Amino acid sequence: MKNHTIHIPSMRGRLIAVFVLGFAFLFGIIFGSRMQSDVFLKAGLTLLGIGACIVISAAAYLIVQQLRWMKNAEKTSDAIEAERNRLQIVLSCMGEGLIVVDKNYRITMFNDRAGALLRLPPSDAVGKPIHAVFPVFHEKTTTHCKTKQLLKNTLHEVNMMTIKLTDNYWCKNNFGKIFPLAFTAVSLWEGNDITGSVLLFRDATEEKEIDQAKDEFVSLASHQLRTPLSTINWYAEMLLDQDAGAITPKQKDFLLEISDANKRMTELVGALLNVSRLDLGTFVIDPKPADIIALIKEVLHDLKSLTEKNKISVSEQYDTTPTVNIDKDLMRIVFQNLISNAIKYSQKGGSVAVEVCLSRATQRGKKQLSISIRDNGYGIPKTEQKKIFTKLFRADNIKAKITDGNGLGLYIVKSIITHAGGTISFTSEENKGTNFFITLPCDGIQSRADKKNHTVL
């Protein structure tokens, strides 16, 4: 913009000079032609004057056009500069940090909010590798940076990735402070090519504290509810056993309803308490050598009455497997949830298959146990399968058929398996059944201490 401001007056001076010199030249030719008596020389001077007039007019036209172009360019430059300033103001006022990286994971744009969150001036961040400025870790551990791994999908194919608060990712700023993180990354396009990734992130500390306070409240409330529920159950059993005297058949029916409702409430309170402990990280993992197959058989025995009630046939297939270091209490919760679901959510006369095998070595050279629990029941609608491991979710096709259930079981199962270093997945088709797959490392799971002296799950 400044160059245009300097050159426009200069171009105007050139235009004036062309006109002055042109008029002087033309005046000289006209005056000279009048002074000549030779007809041919006068004609020649006249033609020269006409040619000079054309050249001068063309030069003046070109100069005028260039002046107009320069004025337009100046206006365009001013508009671009104003738009750039507005964009810079918008980026500076954003409540979220913005980072743009190229395909080599190097930062090309870094707004002021990102600088404030990461305690680094934007000028110092541009050009650096993203993982050096924006190190992301899982579960507050700073041993393995996950930044490049998380952004990989947005740089190699058209994709958008979202990390929520519940995914439990953390970031370390330039001062070494760790804060909970939520962010979204999307592929950056130029023409038909992916040239980088755009990342928006925020410090989720306040959300984390609110979520933790909520979980602590649920935990406290669940603890407080256990005592009166136990009391109700105790007195209901005493009345049913006629410890307080004989009861009529109608009174017995009422007491059985009270007892059943109390058991359902106790199960719900227990599930809420387990969820709050998992979310707060206040549960214990106490691995000891155990036989997975023996544990599964114990669970199947405990569920025998439910199996017989629903007339479900159970098939079992087990390979020879080694003893594995697991937390039996936690894994019992996993198998009870998955197998009881397979039984409850199958029509009468259905079938459930349980398989355990020793899979081949993983990429890291370690073997793992593969566990499959399959049924031919109601299945999960395809449109709802992505929500299956979320809190309080129950599929629509199940709600109408089975009214009891709290939608917390699979969330608890997923959390336990993840903390144990295993994986869980499933395939399902509505009205044809569901198959859950679990993998567990054969070298066992790591122990975890109780942070707040809470009881185990």
Image (cartoon, rainbow, N blue to C red):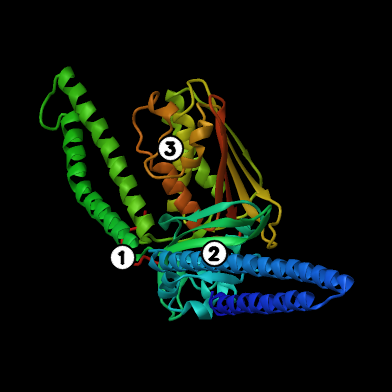
Q: Calculate the distance from the C-alpha at mark 3 to the C-alpha at mark 1.
A: 30 Å
**Could you tell me the amino acid type at mark 3?**
Asp
Q: Nearer the viewer, mark 3 or mark 1?
A: 1
- Element type at mark 2: helix
Tell me which corner region of the image, top left, top right, bottom left or bottom right, holds residue 433: top right
Taking the image as shown, residue 69 lies to the left or right of residue 83, namely right
Query: Which residue sits furthest right?
Result: 40
**Could you tell me the amino acid type at mark 2?**
Thr
Q: Residues within 10 Å of mark 3 (few under 14, many from 20)?
A: few
Do residues under tags 3 and 1 come within 8 Å of each other at their CB atoms?
no
Q: What residue appears at the point 72 percent right and 78 percent down from the top-left corner?
A: 25
Q: Which of marks 2 and 3 is in front?
A: 2
| Residue 32 image offset from top left, x and y in percent | 77, 78
Count of labels in the image: 3
Residue 302: mark? 3
User: Which residue is labeled 2 in the image?
Assistant: 76
Residue 179: mark? none
Taking the image as shown, residue 216 lies to the left or right of residue 114, namely left
Residue situated in front as seen by the camera: 95 or 409: 95
Answer above or below: position of 425 versus 10: above
User: Which residue is labeled 1 in the image?
Assistant: 453
Is residue 140 among the parts visible in the rendering? no
Residue situated in front as seen by the camera: 132 or 332: 132
- Element type at mark 3: helix
Who comes first in sequence, dot 3 or dot 1? Answer: 3
Do residues under tags 2 and 1 come within 8 Å of each other at their CB atoms?
no
Q: What residue appears at the point 36 percent right and 65 percent down from the top-left corner?
A: 450
